[in-house]
Amino acid sequence: MLSAQLPYPTCVQTRPKSPVFPTKQAGRLTQRTNLTRSQPNFELSRAAYLYVCPPDCPATHFEPQNHRFFALPSPFAAWPAISNRKTTPKSPQHRARRYTKLLSMPFVPGFEHDVFISYAHGDDRDWINRFLDRLGPAINRLLPGTVLWVDKDDLRKSRNFEQDIPESLTASAAFLSLVSPTYITRPYCVQQEYRRFATHIAERKQPTQRFGTPAFSADLFGFRCPILPLTDDSYRDVIFPGATDISFCDDISTFPIASPQFEEQLRTLLRELRSLLLRMRNHATPVFLYPPAPSREIADAHSALTRELHAQSYRILPGNELDPFPALTRSDLAVLLLGPQYDQSRTTERIVAQLAQLDIPFVIWPSPALETDGEVAQRGFFQSLIQLESSRKTLLRSAITPEKLKEEVLAILNPRAKIPPPAASKPRVYVVYDSAKASEKNNVGKIVYQYKDDFQFDLSENPRQHTLSLTQSDGVLLVWGEANEDWCAAEFEQMVRLATNPKPRGICLFDPQQSKVALAEQIRNSHSVFVAEEFGAFDATRLDAFFAPIRKAKAATA
């Protein structure tokens, strides 16, 4: 899939007699593509793009204007290797590192960038660029995956800076100001960039926010680095008051790059940056997501879940660790994604065995490919998971989409989230129905109208509240008329699994009647679920037996 097609610069030859575009049919610049058939869609950083060129174009790369470009064959042709050297991962850990790199997420969960670099464009750009060339690789060696946001002149034409910079400020974990006489006289640097970030930090440290704890009460989340001597010390009261300068200059001039003074201050900055980013990352709730390097069949679900968890400030384990078991014991939740291939190393089996002994919840999601193309051993392993008895296990169906999987996982991670209290202390009943069908809305309307005076009805129109409503309502009623039978089977299974006894559960059947009579009898015999048959004219008294115990239970607790 190709998107965000952008203008491309003049073709550049990487080496003699090897043009990037050998014909006049220029390639297209894109920010999203599929590298290989086994990798999911991924977003590239702003400074990295891919060229998609004709199928007969050689796979090469070059670096014009300090950007990384790759010339790749068209995705509509068979994909060869990116380069002539072999790219087959040598180990699962190698594949995990490669996959994590493709996802291109910052080191600190919940942010798009780790460090926002603020500087004045009137200062020595050559020195600043060389400083950034040293800082970026150095911090990535210490904290792999660290993302720096830098405002570069050569990128301005492709950006809306009135919107882009404010968004990048609030999406950055830390702020690094390269202070100079020019910097402190520029209203944009001080008022627009620093002031915005300082305001955001005040909000970030509110008691209800993630970093509103005593451990971060004294943190400024920023660093002040003078790069030219200043005659007036008043800037210290304006930019991060109370912070200690990490100076890259003396009273006369800027420290030359690679000089002993420069290296000493760079080590100090790296030490402080590493300490802050590590504490911020470790403050996130850990989630164990396995396998770390997914196969093609579960890559979409893995990528969607990884991005959502990261955006919600959860830390994902085991990462690139060789041994996943220590990470498992540190996690608040484990999520296992099962593809069609059996794990010959039996690591997944040992993880499940350890989960059975640990006091943490875990979610198991079998991919649709497991059901259709699963290996025999993998099918047997999944059957053993079905029979595994554990109150902490949540076994999902393969029909659950990656979007639904995200909702299930987030609902388990955030059990403190509450649905709004019912009006006037009425008992709350959650009605599950297919809101896409007008006839089903009519059926639900008949029920709600008859019982609205005694009950507070929540309708299944908000997917994000679905799991919470199933678990926290006083009763759950599934309404099935003309909706698809597969839809009903999936919702019924989820209701039985999540809306556990003694919570009253019921299913109300409407026309068409075919095959539903036998189904109603089967449900009565195999599940403790109330069944109401509303075939033909609607009769509210047929539902009295479902609502009576809910009303009685609410009265007993009043």
Image (cartoon, grey):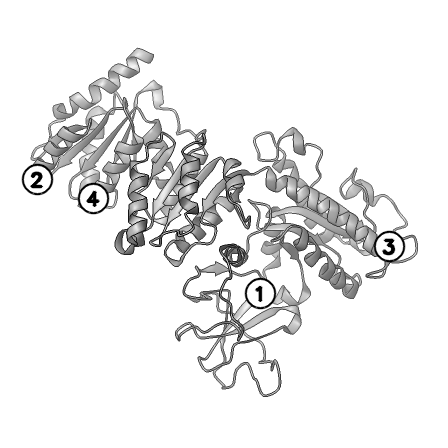
Residue displayed at 30% across by 47% down: 398
Look at label 2 and name its amino acid: Gln
The residue at which mark 2 appears reads as: 513
Is residue 172 shown to the viewer in this render? yes
Say what secondary structure mark 2 lies in: loop
N-terminal of the pair, mark 3 or mark 2, is 3
The answer for how far apart the CA atoms under marks 3 and 4 are is 73 Å
Eye-nearest disc, 3 or 4? 3
Point out the image quarter for the N terminus.
Answer: bottom left
Percent across and percent down for residue 68 are 60, 68
The answer for how far apart the CA atoms under marks 1 and 3 are is 33 Å
The residue at which mark 3 appears reads as: 261
Look at label 4 and name its amino acid: Ala
Percent across and percent down for residue 440 are 19, 40
N-terminal of the pair, mark 4 or mark 2, is 4
The answer for how far apart the CA atoms under marks 2 and 1 are is 59 Å
